[in-house]
Amino acid sequence: MGLLKTTDADTKEKILSTALHLISNNPNHRVSVSELKRETGLSTGSFYHFFPKGADDIAHDLYVLILGDLKNSILLGTDSISVTHKFIHRCVDNFFNWHLNHPTESTFLNTQADIVQSERGALASQLKQQFAIKLTEKLTTILTKEFPRKKFELRILIPAFFGSCQEYIKSWHMKGRPSSLIKDAKSKMADFLYAGLIG
């Protein structure tokens, strides 16, 4: 019997996880292919096979993967919720908890946001748009049942949700606030968003 072979998926995962570790430990540092080669022991060919544009492709793929995981986490446990206030609180709670439970990935998202502005950021932008539509549809269903005679401007709420929560998390990272205080912060943020929606 031969030795187990390393698959393409294993190699790609090794490159991405190593890059994430290096970037998160030094957020302002641009990781190079030579640095990743040294850390992983892989050849130059292995890198450019998976990431033709080198380190920029690696950073972009990481951003898309991590962003996708965050978006999937936000709606966890919301299927049975039929009250707007509870729904918003659960989404905000999920958002904050993801950042607390994934400190490395959270640091990466908060220091690599310029990736979305680049040409290779199209997929990341598309992910955000798709999730915004999904969140809007779910919230609209709840609001219509709870407040059948009222109209809502969800185009304002969705950017507010992402913008306010993300900026709060970013300031948390930068100011080194203790995570013990985040429970109150989550509740206040959810109440703020709900008040802005209901009026």
Image (spheres, helix red, strand yellow):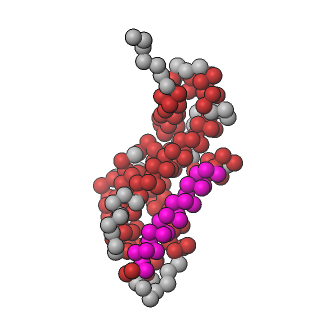
- Name the residue at 32% across, 67% down: 80
- Name the residue at 46% across, 86% down: 150
Q: Is residue 142 magenta?
A: yes
Do we see residue 133 in this rendering? yes
- Name the residue at 41% across, 51% down: 99
Task: Please determine whether, in this image, residue 54 is positioned above or below residue 124.
Answer: above
Task: Between residue 91 and residue 185, name the one nearer to us.
Answer: 91
Do we see residue 171 in this rendering? no
Query: What percent of the width, then of the height, locates residue 121?
Result: 63, 49
Farthest bottom residue? 149
Farthest front residue? 1
Q: Which quadrant does the C terminus fall into?
A: bottom left
Residue 173 placement, left or right of 155? left
Question: Which quarter of the figure has residue 28?
Answer: top right
Query: What percent of the width, then of the height, locates residue 101?
Result: 36, 47
Query: What percent of the width, then of the height, locates residue 3?
Result: 42, 14
Query: What percent of the width, then of the height, locates residue 98?
Result: 39, 52
Q: Is residue 114 magenta?
A: no
Task: Please determine whether, in this image, residue 100 is positioned above or below residue 131.
Answer: above
Q: How many marks?
A: 0
Q: Which quadrant does the N terminus fall into?
A: top left
Farthest top residue? 1
Q: Which residues are magenta?
A: 122-144
Task: Between residue 20 and residue 76, name the one nearer to us.
Answer: 76
Secondary structure mostly seen in magenta is helix
- Name the residue at 49% across, 39% down: 24
